[in-house]
């Protein structure tokens, strides 16, 4: 059952001129969150912004082993993300959650290959922790515009995650899209089962879904649609889900997702 | 303290109703809200058949409001009765079913079907959705159309009938009168204002449907005025809505003439708003020494303003 918390900002770390990680004192939500779930967030009390915005839970924070908050990875693109970028310690952010369907977890010998584009890195910190605790081998394919937009690399390395990077300007890792190293790795093949988890811009998700299908690998994607309420009330965040070979029907991504099996989505 | 209100033959335990289109089928919210505490739950508009709705983007935020063009995605009346109504009954919700049709016969058929279903308290006739061509807006924008659909539905159902009026007309009060003349038990207003928003960088409309319905605090003063006009025109109960986000907003509508109110967009912002609204109304009644919330309705005091206006 989701709860609504007037969460105090514990700290706000700017990672770049556009990206920040904001830590919120919402321990109950943090403790109940499974990897891939999200919260609906509204900074400030007025009518701007009016609606909450969805954010994946980035990290679950612990002090001396006790869960005391969560963080959100945010990129400054609109009113809400600007306010989250500008927020200072002690500010209050309304935080409703946890919401939605999480990623399915896999156990060894199956390997986890996570594919992140930009701010789509968000669900993979908690997923890494949960999977590593199960002993699952984790690889992160992580793409961004430029090397300055790739964050938390040491965080993932410290948790034994193999990193495969790509930048659109070639400043770090592969030059181009993240599907390039993904495709190459899939071509090399793997003796064990692989589960691909993806989160990022929808064109990237579609590309990853096609790559996964070509190589007959299981794949789950986390979609981000414009969302009004997060609880199934407004019917704005729908995603077309396949109905037979040609048809589709709309499913609310707040309830049915945001994580969907990639082959269920009617990409075209 | 008595929070109950009378909407025609229907007694509501309080004047706060979840607005259609903003509360799913009610069951989505059963985990966070005790549905039996609400005056009523107006479920998402139902056609006879299932409907796909518009492709995304379906909503966009605008100053102090939002535009939507969902396109009445829905499961149809039969699945609603089978899959949703039993849970609403179990949770003791007062269910107001919002119905939509493309023809008078469809409204009549829906009313017949729902009259036989157990657990429906009233029918709200959606003759005002701005987002679909074939829907009831053609009835809602014509006085004779409004009269025809209301009187046809009244003939086939013992349930209270509440046409939901569009604000996208010159004189909404005349539509309230047409509804009253046709035998409506109450009217509800306003549905959303037809509006649009454009991304100037791409020059594309922000909604796939190009136009959509504006709701939220931005429309509240216009909606209050329209409720006030309807109250002065008809004797039947008026259910007011449009941007209500606090007890003060709800009371403003009641003072203007509403017997009950609906809350929509604010539920998206705060799904826990319902108990806050009821607490705020109780606090107001106590502070003003009023025993019954129904005594707040249409208590707007215009005398001083009228005197000032006459003497100036």
Image (cartoon, rainbow, N blue to C red):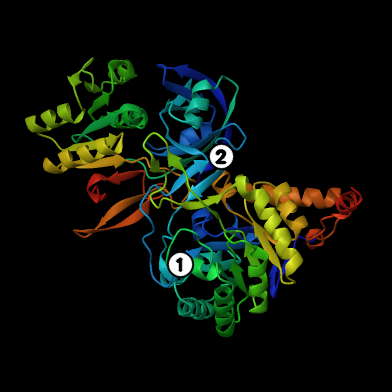
Q: Which residue is mark 1?
A: B135
Q: Earlier in the sequence, mark 1 or mark 2?
A: 2
- The residue shown at (20%, 42%) is A218
Observer-nearest residue: B225 or A221? Answer: B225
Q: Are marks 1 and 2 in contact (CB under 8 Å)?
A: no
- The residue shown at (88%, 55%) is B303
Report the side of A265 relative to B48 (left or right): left
- Asked whether residue B275 is in view, the answer is no
Report the side of A181 relative to B25 (left or right): left
- The residue shown at (12%, 42%) is A214
- Helix, strand or loop at mark 2: loop
Q: Residues within 10 Å of mark 1 (few under 14, many from 20)?
A: many
User: How far from the left and from the top, in percent, is residue A258?
Assistant: 36, 43
User: How far from the left and from the top, in percent, is residue B246?
Assistant: 68, 46
Up-down: is B208 above or below B43?
Answer: above
Q: Which residue is mark 2?
A: B63
User: How far from the left and from the top, in percent, is residue B96?
Assistant: 58, 67
Label number found at residue A50: none
Q: Residue furthest front?
A: B312
- Asked whether residue B4 is in view, the answer is yes
Which subunit holds the residue at mark 2? B
Observer-nearest residue: B202 or B223? Answer: B202
Up-down: is A193 above or below B294?
Answer: above
Q: Are marks 1 and 2 on the same chain?
A: yes
User: How far from the left and from the top, in percent, is residue A39?
Assistant: 47, 37
């Amino acid at each position: 059952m989701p709860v609504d918390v007037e969460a105090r900002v514990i700290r706000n770390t700017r990672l770049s001129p556009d990206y920040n990680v904001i830590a919120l004192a919402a321990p109950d939500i943090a403790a109940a969150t499974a990897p891939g779930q999200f919260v609906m967030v509204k900074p400030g009390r007025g009518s701007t912004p009016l609606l909450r915005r969805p954010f994946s839970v980035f990290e679950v924070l612990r002090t001396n082993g006790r869960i005391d908050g969560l963080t959100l990875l945010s990129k400054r693109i609109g009113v809400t993300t600007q306010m989250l970028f500008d927020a200072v310690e002690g500010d209050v952010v309304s935080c409703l959650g946890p919401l939605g369907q999480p990623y399915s977890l896999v156990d060894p010998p199956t390997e986890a290959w996570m594919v992140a584009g930009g701010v789509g890195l968000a669900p993979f910190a908690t997923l890494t922790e949960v999977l590593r605790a199960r002993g699952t081998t984790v690889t992160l394919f992580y793409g961004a515009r430029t090397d300055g937009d790739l964050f938390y690399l040491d965080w993932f390395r410290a948790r034994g995650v193999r990193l495969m990077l790509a930048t659109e300007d070639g400043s770090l890792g592969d030059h181009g899209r993240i599907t390039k190293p993904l495709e190459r790795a899939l071509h090399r093949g793997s003796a064990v089962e692989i589960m691909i988890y993806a989160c990022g811009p929808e064109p990237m998700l579609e590309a990853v879904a096609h790559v996964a299908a070509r190589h007959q690998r299981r794949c789950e994607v986390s979609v981000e649609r414009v969302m009004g309420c997060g609880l199934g009330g407004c019917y704005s965040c729908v995603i077309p889900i396949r109905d037979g070979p040609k048809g589709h029907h709309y499913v609310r991504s707040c309830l049915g997702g945001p994580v969907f099996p990639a082959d269920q989505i009617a990409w075209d | 303290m008595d929070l109950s209100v009378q909407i025609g033959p229907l007694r509501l335990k309080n004047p706060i109703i979840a607005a259609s289109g903003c509360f799913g089928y009610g069951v989505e919210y059963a985990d966070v809200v005790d549905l039996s505490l609400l005056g009523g739950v107006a479920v998402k508009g139902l056609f006879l058949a299932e409907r796909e709705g518009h492709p995304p983007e379906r909503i966009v935020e605008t100053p102090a409001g939002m535009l939507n063009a969902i396109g009445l995605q829905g499961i149809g009346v039969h699945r609603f009765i089978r899959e949703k109504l039993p849970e609403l009954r179990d949770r003791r919700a007062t269910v107001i079913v919002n119905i939509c049709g493309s023809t008078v016969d469809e409204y009549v058929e829906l009313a017949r079907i729902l009259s036989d279903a157990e657990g429906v308290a009233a029918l709200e006739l959606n003759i005002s959705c701005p987002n679909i061509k074939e829907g009831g807006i053609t009835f809602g924008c014509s006085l004779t159309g409004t009269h025809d659909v209301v009187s046809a539905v009244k003939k086939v159902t013992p349930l209270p009938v509440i046409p939901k009026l569009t604000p996208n007309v010159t004189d909404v009060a005349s539509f309230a009168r047409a509804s009253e003349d046709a035998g409506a038990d109450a009217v509800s207003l306003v549905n959303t204002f037809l509006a649009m928003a454009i991304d100037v960088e791409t020059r594309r409309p922000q909604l796939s449907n190009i136009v959509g319905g504006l709701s939220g605090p931005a429309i509240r003063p216009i909606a209050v005025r329209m409720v006030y006009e309807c109250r002065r025109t008809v004797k039947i109960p008026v259910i007011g809505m449009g941007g209500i986000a606090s007890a003060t907003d709800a009371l403003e509508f009641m003072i203007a003439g509403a017997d009950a109110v609906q809350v929509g967009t604010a539920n998206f912002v705060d799904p826990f708003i319902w108990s806050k609204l009821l607490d705020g109304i109780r606090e107001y009644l106590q502070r003003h020494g009023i025993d019954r919330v129904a005594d707040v309705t249409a208590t707007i005091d215009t005398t001083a303003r009228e005197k000032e206006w006459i003497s100036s």
